[in-house]
Each structure stands twice: as structure tokens, then as C-alpha cells.
Image (cartoon, rainbow, N blue to C red):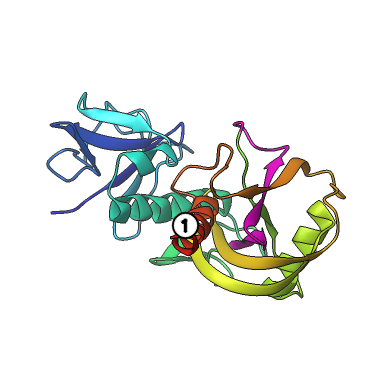
Amino acid sequence: MKTWVLFNEKDELLIKHENETYRLPTDNDWNPDNSSVNEQGDSPHHIQKDDWVLRVVDADIPSSFVRSSLRQSWNLLSSDEYLRAGKAWELLYWSEETRFCSRCGKPMNWNSDISLLCSSCGREIWPQLNIAIIVLVQKGHEALLVKAKTFRRDFFGLVAGFVETGESLEECVAREVFEETSLRITNIRYFSSQPWPYPLGLMVGFHADYLSGEIAFADGELKEGHFFRADNLPTIPEGLSMARMLIDDWVAKERKEQE
């Protein structure tokens, strides 16, 4: 039985709700041949990746479905289903943003699970990820937490930024920390990586140690930042983010040292 990943025209994920549980729908929940689906004209109706991801336009959605943003679905779906929905969204977003060939301007068509092929010149392309680093800087028994001007909610997170052409991940970590806080760091070490489909992202997490400097917001991206102890943290990001994973990892190590 096929499991579907469905998004409506508002970029909302459609999830099956039953018996106080949530899951991605299957053939039993959704009829992909529903005649009410609008497949005419230029409507953004796509079936791709072996027909498992679908943009639903002008369709009658069963009442047992709930609408959720992809980010909110992390709280509803299993980890595997959330990751699957994230990959589906990235492919759907990419295909809708890459409808025409950048070389000759002709339409692009699906050629494999994750590639598009120009209908005229034969150019094949694949999704390109936006790679970003995020780093927890430790100073003794304190960690640097910051507030960015772009944060939608009132919480402290970690220094993060996109990797530039021609630099390594470690060089990006040092540059972003210095550009955003005026601090110098050392002992940069890899923690983990995470798909970040908002959209087409890959988040790479690091730990680092404070070396020198005073906090000053050099490039204007941050509005507040302080070093905090593990037993006196402010409001921090939710569990789905790499920032929270880094903070939780540091807190666990601090508590273990105190035992």
C-alpha cells in the first residue's frame, strides 16, 4: 500500500488524524484519481518521486485530514514520517522553482527520483542544498546564546550562517562567530548534521571554545547575546532544531560533570 505526502496550494501538509494519532495518508485515505483534482492549465499539480508526493489543488479533502505546516508536523508525525515529508517538500518546492531550463528556457521534466531533464537541450539538474553552520561556543561552564533580529519568537538560539563559496565548514564557523559577535574561537569540532527543508537546507552543527574578545554585534544580524550557565538558561529553541540538539548535548555534559 502506497503512503502519500500531500501538500495543498497553501503549502500545508495534509495529515490523517484518527484515534488521537497522526500519520501520513495511504491509498485507503486518499484517492489519487479523484476527479475533483484540478489538472488543467498551469495549476501547480505535480506527481513525482514514484507518485508518492502530490500537490493537491482544488480537491475535496476528507474531513479526517488535518492541515499542518511542515515545521508543526514535527510534533505530530513519527520521526521517519517527518523526514519523509521534509524530503517530499524539498522536491516539490524545487520542481516548482525550476520549471524551465536556465540554458535554453524550455520546460524541465522529471528524469529520475531527484533530477530534472530539459525537454530540448538535454541538460540534467539536481537539487542544490543551501549549507549552513550552527555553533555552540563554550566559555568555561557557560555557553553563548544569542537573539537574532529575524527570530519570530522570543528565544535565545545559537550563532548560525551560510557557508560561502571557497571556504571550509570550519572557516565558516570562525567567520560567522566573529562577524556576528566579534569573538574569536578555537577548538572547532563537528557535532552532527540535519536536513533542514525550509527549504533545501542542510544544517551542520559544531561545538567550539571561546578564545578572546568581547561580545559586540558587528554585522547587525543579532540584537542580544550572553554567556549562560546550564542551570540558568533562558527560553531556547524547540526540540526539532539543531540548535536545541547542541544545547541539550552541552547541558547533559555539564550536568554529568556536576555529579
Horizontal arrangement in the rendering, residue 130 relative to residue 47 (left or right): right
Over which residues does the magenta segment extend?
Answer: 130-154
Check the picture and name the quadrant holding the N terminus: bottom left
- The residue depicted at 44 percent of the width and 33 percent of the height is 9
Quadrant housing residue 169: bottom right
Amino acid found under the numbered disc labelled 1: Arg
137 falls in the magenta region:
yes
Residue 48 in view (yes/no): yes
Judge the density around disc 1: few (<14), some (14-19), many (≥20) Cα neighbours within 10 Å.
Answer: few
Residue drawn at x 37%, y 55% as measured from the top left: 83
Relative to 138, is 96 above or below? Answer: above
Quick check: 36 left or right of 138? left
Q: How many labels does the image show?
A: 1
Magenta stretch: dominant secondary structure: strand
Which residue lies under the disc numbered 1?
A: 255
User: Residue 126: horizontal and vertical position, in percent?
Assistant: 53, 67
Q: Residue furthest top?
A: 63
Above or below, 43 against 191 in this view is above
Place of residue 45 in the rendered image (x, y in percent of width and height, measured from the top left): 40, 42
The spot of residue 34 in percent (x, y) is: 22, 35
Which residue is nearer to you in this view: 189 or 77? 189
Q: Where in the figure is residue 157, as x and y percent of width and height?
A: 62, 46
